[in-house]
Image (spheres, helix red, strand yellow):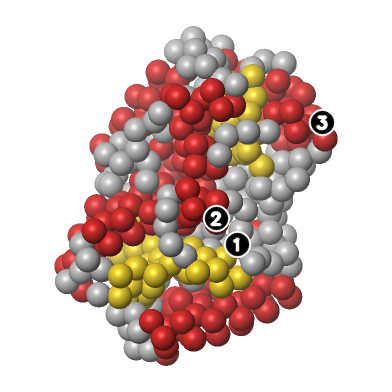
Amino acid sequence: MKILLSVEHPAWVHQFKYIIKELTEKGHEVKVLAIRKDVTIDLLNAYSIPYEIISESSGNNTFEKGLIFLSTTWKMFLISRKFHPDLYLGRSSPMMAINAFIFRKPHVLFEDSEPSKFCLNTCKLCSDLIVTPSNFKLDLGGKQIRVNGFKELFYLHPDLFISNPDVLKNCGLNLDDRYAVVRFVSWKAHHDIGQHGIRDKIGLLRDLSEKIKVVIVSEGELPDELKQYQMSAPPADYHDILAYASLFVSDAQTSTTEAAMLGVPAIRCNTFVGNNDMGVFQELEKKYGLIVNVSKEEEIMPIVDMWFSHSNLKELWLMKRKAMLVENVNMTNYMIKLLHEKYNI
């Protein structure tokens, strides 16, 4: 069977890398279409996943994103006409959904981000199956399948991911070091318009570095004062470095959930936080106690100080992680089983 899959964000590479491997080993032909965003191409190369680039950018504003939407939809159409896919697979990509509808082929996707309204509405009309976490707050109708699982359990479930301490030396770290990973995102995604994350990056790093060694991972260019903290390891080593961290602080969405999946105490700070926050983050905070969500930067350091007063902080979080894993599934195994049951793949 021929399967077309799009990768439009670095997290999508991680999410589908094991599915691509398993489908390929079963004899299926998987064609990956990629948009160059942050380290997406670096990750595809690191995992030896063949791909075809359909856009050199994801766009910096609404106008650019609109043009890229039109051009990538057209490029997918031309590729589909030549490749003849039997199935479209991935996230809530409207370009994929539209092409699946045009060619009358099924589109199966996973989505956990409620703010992606345009993408979700398009997929609701054009796609076959929409898999969401059970905590997803939107009702997408009869095409929706809810499952107890997080997107990050496609690749960070302990059946799939075993951390490698050898990569720490690439950042000048040792296994015995206490360090914090700080992650900043660019806030250029279509659903990020009107929102923002941590603005006083220098102030945060000044306060945090007085208490613990810091490693920064950033999508955008860092101020000169912070470049000394920037992660020097390859992007593919990021999860190994995160796994051994004592603390995670970020304005990112996916990376915060990744920290939770690895049992790392995590603070997420951005303007999405509030009563209408995404179900994933509300569940990770209120049900499992793995993260703390704040909307104001001045709330970060008091939480850090409180956490650092505990001598067994990491052990406590690993116990919380264990409780979370009992109730949530290996998402790669789930999706492979679903594809087999529904489409005999």
Q: Is residue 37 above or below residue 245?
A: below
Q: Is residue 234 left or right of residue 148?
A: right
- Mark 1 vs 3: CB contact within 8 A: no
Say which mark, if any, is on residue 225.
3
Q: Quadrant of residue 318?
A: top left
Q: Quadrant of residue 284?
A: top left
Residue flagged by tag 1: what amino acid is it?
Arg
Comes first in the chain, label 1 or label 3: 1
Residue flagged by tag 2: what amino acid is it?
Thr
- Disc 2 target residue: 40
> Which residue is depicted at the point 55% across and 47% down?
253
- Disc 1 target residue: 36
| Residue 319 in view in this figure | yes
Q: Quadrant of residue 102?
A: bottom left
- Mark 2 vs 3: CB contact within 8 A: no
Residue flagged by tag 3: what amino acid is it?
Glu
- Mark 1 vs 2: CB contact within 8 A: yes
> Which residue is depicted at the point 54% across and 23% down?
169
> Which residue is depicted at the point 22% across and 66% down?
27
The residue mark sitting in front, 1 or 3, is 1
Q: Quadrant of the C terminus?
A: bottom left
Q: Is residue 111 left or right of residue 61?
A: left
How far apart are the alpha carbons under marks 2 and 3? 26 Å
